[in-house]
């Protein structure tokens, strides 16, 4: 399998949204729209990376950088491409993107009810911080 990991373009927006829809995170509270993804692509401080197999998007990750800390979101690998190191590759590339911007620390927000994620993140070097909780508010 020859997987290419690259920065997404506007041509990838629909495929990324379809992948997220097919494996909706139970923690998701906002419906992603094409314009939201296009705004991310236009932002100099965040990146959407895709993993492509023969041009077909089979994985995604969002690397967010606010000038202080990095955050990873929307890590999804299509079910028929799992356990082949695709997510490991996406995380490594996202770390490269964040490191290049001076980011010293990264958080991955993980819904603990997900089947695979709680095993995946420690396997790629992320510690579960059980002392921190989230306080959230949607801006309408
Ligand atoms: C979590 C997810 C992204 C992992 O993608 P993946 O490409 O299969 O992961 P990798 O092949 O890179 O796995 C790297 C390591 O993580 C661990 N791991 C991954 N999936 C695992 C699973 N189902 N059970 C146990 N360990 C797992 C293993 O240690 C694995 O290394 P190994 O295969 O050599 O044993 C994928 O299962 C997925 O998309 N799940 C649904 C969406 C989701 O939960 N996303 C995460 C949101 S935070």
Image (tube, grey):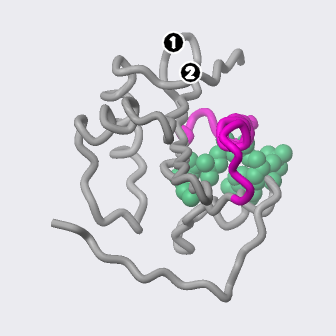
- Determine the residue positioned at 40% across, 66% down: 26
Outermost left residue: 140
SS assignment at label 1? loop
Q: Which residues are magenta?
A: 77-105
Residue 59 location, x and y as percent?
Answer: 54, 34
Q: Is mark 1 within 8 Å of ligand 1?
A: no
Number of the label disc, if any, that sits on residue 88:
none
Mark 1 closeness class: few <14, some 14–19, many ≥20 residues within 10 Å: few
The residue tagged 2 is 52
Find out whether residue 110 is within the magenta segment: no
The residue tagged 1 is 55
Q: Main secondary structure of the magenta part?
A: helix
* Image vertical order of residue 85 relative to residue 120, above or below: above
Residue 53 location, x and y as percent?
Answer: 58, 18
Give the quarter of the figure containing the C terminus.
bottom left
Q: Please name whichever residue, 6 or 122, is drawn nearer the observer in this view of the structure.
A: 6
In the picture, measured across the screen, residue 130 lies left or right of residue 63, that is right
Marks 1 and 2 close (CB-CB < 8 Å): yes
């Amino acid at each position: 399998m020859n997987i290419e990991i690259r920065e997404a373009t506007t041509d990838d927006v629909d495929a990324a949204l379809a992948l997220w829809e097919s494996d909706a995170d139970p923690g998701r509270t906002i419906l992603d729209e094409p314009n939201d993804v296009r705004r991310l692509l236009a932002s100099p401080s965040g990146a959407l990376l895709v993993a492509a197999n023969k041009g077909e998007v089979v994985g995604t990750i969002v690397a967010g950088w606010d000038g202080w800390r990095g955050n990873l979101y929307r890590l999804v690998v299509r079910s028929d491409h799992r356990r082949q190191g695709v997510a490991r590759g996406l995380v490594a590339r996202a770390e490269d993107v964040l490191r290049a911007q001076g980011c010293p620390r990264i958080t991955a927000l993980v819904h603990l009810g997900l089947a695979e994620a709680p095993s995946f993140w420690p396997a790629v070097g992320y510690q579960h911080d059980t002392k921190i909780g989230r306080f959230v508010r949607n801006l309408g």
